[in-house]
């Protein structure tokens, strides 16, 4: 099994995201995780949501400081981070495939 798929499954489990319908689809799992984080934050105060957005460096603008816009930005940032993480894992796995064997 793809090691990053296992990482995503662990992340989903930790936050209680239901990924059963995704099977082995990493993009689906990523979307479910992002939506779950959003739904977990929806009941928080705006100040808490802003703080979380700043911590993860979500793209929030001062002019668009309403709760829904900030939650959208957080959701997008989570997807972006998980996609970059997937690319990194894939790159590492590909590098392992091309490492020379020590025949000495």
Image: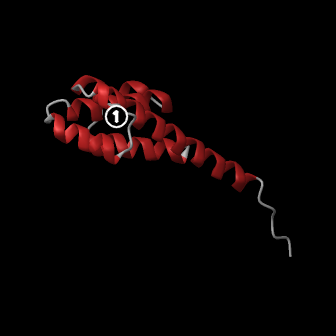
Look at the image and tell me in which quarter the C terminus lies: bottom right
- Give the vertical position of 92 relative to 29 (above or below): below
Seen at 18% across and 41% down, the residue is 48
Seen at 51% across and 37% down, the residue is 83
Instruction: Give the residue pinned by disc 1.
Output: 74
Residue 66 position, x and y percent, is 23, 25
Query: In this orientation, which residue lies closer to the viewer: 12 or 43?
Result: 43
Seen at 70% across and 48% down, the residue is 94
- Give the vertical position of 24 relative to 57 (above or below): above
Identify the residue at the far bottom of this view. 104
Q: Is residue 89 left or right of residue 68?
A: right
Q: Is residue 33 left or right of residue 1?
A: left
Q: Secondary structure at mark 1?
A: helix
Which quarter of the picture shows residue 77? top left
Residue 63 position, x and y percent, is 30, 26
What is the basis of the colouring in this image? secondary structure
Seen at 27% across and 31% down, the residue is 38
Q: Is residue 21 left or right of residue 67?
A: right
């Amino acid at each position: 099994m793809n090691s990053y798929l296992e990482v995503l499954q662990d992340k989903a489990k930790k936050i209680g995201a239901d990924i059963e319908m995704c099977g082995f689809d990493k993009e689906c799992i990523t979307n479910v995780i992002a939506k779950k984080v959003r739904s977990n934050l929806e009941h928080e105060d705006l100040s808490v949501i802003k703080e979380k957005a700043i911590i993860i460096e979500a793209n929030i603008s001062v002019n668009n400081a309403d709760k829904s816009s900030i939650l959208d930005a957080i959701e997008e940032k989570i997807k972006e981070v998980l996609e970059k993480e997937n690319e990194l894992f894939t790159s590492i796995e590909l590098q392992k495939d091309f490492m020379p064997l020590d025949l000495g």
